[in-house]
Amino acid sequence: MSLVIVALVALLLIAAAGFLVLQATAKERQEDADLRLRVLGGQDEAAAALLESQRERELRNPILRWSCHLIWRTGVDLEPAAVRRILLGGLLLAIVVLLIFGVLAGIACITLAFIVGWLVLTQMAARRRIKIISQFPSFLESVIRVLVAGNTLEEALSSASREAPEPIRPLFINVSRQVRLGAPLEAVLMQMAEIHDLRDLKVMALAASINRKFGGSMRNVLRSLISGIRTRENAARELRALTAETRFSAVVLSVIPTLLVVFIIWRNPGYYTQIWADHSGRLLLCTAIILQVAGVFVIWRMMKSTETD
């Protein structure tokens, strides 16, 4: 018990030291940004440019970049420094869990927490992505109306984004802001498409790139894109209706073994303990768990393939 208390105190001291280091780093970067702003005259565009360049430097870490993209897809615009502090706190919490519950139980708890958190964020991002795709045709129609008036594509996107609903509005406001700072439109659209996992935005980025290099009518391309999105949505609705029974059967087949295990543990807590005490029993349990996970993964991949664009 005394060893656990000493370990917890050490972890708290490590966390405090890490927090102070992060605070000092953030303060140093803020002072550097303020100095540059004073040199540049304190303009808002210059401040935004410095923030964007600082964010790009911080996202060179692949783990931090993956975490930021996962959070940004849900619509939460956290800075990379805040995401880094969240990851550091999660790492310290994982160490505490390992010390309290032991290695095996601690790894199980950490894995379960990671999977649940990943699933929650993924579902939130998927719901937001569906809303963005449903709003995309109407947004493109607004862009076409502005293009007909003789404006450029950049001006059309900026004008349409100011009148767009949530959640597509902040997405294209960010695009317009980066374009005003001097970034190429097609590069910004491609970056946003990769962050938010939007294939239609990649098509729009390719169309903008081709239009910039070789010319042509951007309005016809956008009309074709609108038609393709609406046709795909109708086909997706029909596919979901046709596969509803199959998807329900897949959920039942995945959930029944887990519920059966929980029921057995509730009615006879020592059942699996006796099996685990024997070598062949441990082998059977591990094999059953591996087969169950593999079966759920295969079913998930089969159902995911029916939703592919």
Image (cartoon, rainbow, N blue to C red):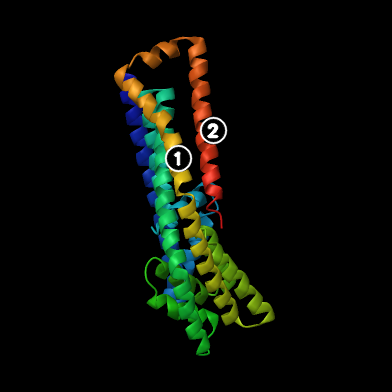
Residue density around tag 2, few if under 14, some if 14–19, many if 20 or more, within 10 Å: few
Q: Position of residue 288 (x, y in %)?
A: 50, 23
In the displayed structure, 219 sits above or below 65; it is below
Q: Which residue is mark 1?
A: 249
Q: Earlier in the sequence, mark 2 or mark 1?
A: 1
Q: Disc 2 to disc 1, how far (Cα)?
A: 17 Å
In the displayed structure, 62 sits above or below 165; it is above
Q: Secondary structure at mark 1?
A: helix
The image quadrant that residue 258 belongs to is top left
Dots 2, 1 in contact, CB < 8 A: no
At x 59%, y 68%, the residue is 203
At x 60%, y 75%, the residue is 208
At x 61%, y 73%, the residue is 207
Q: Give the amino acid type for the residue marked by disc 1 in the picture.
A: Ser
Q: Position of residue 149 (x, y in %)?
A: 50, 90
Q: Quadrant of the N terminus?
A: top left
Q: Position of residue 176 (x, y in %)?
A: 48, 74
Q: Camera-side residue: 177 or 84?
A: 177
- Which residue is at the far bottom? 149
Residue 73, numbered circle = none
Tell me if I can see residue 21 in this picture: no
Q: Position of residue 239 (x, y in %)?
A: 50, 55
> How many labels were placed on the picture?
2
Residue density around tag 1, few if under 14, some if 14–19, many if 20 or more, within 10 Å: few
Q: Secondary structure at mark 2?
A: helix
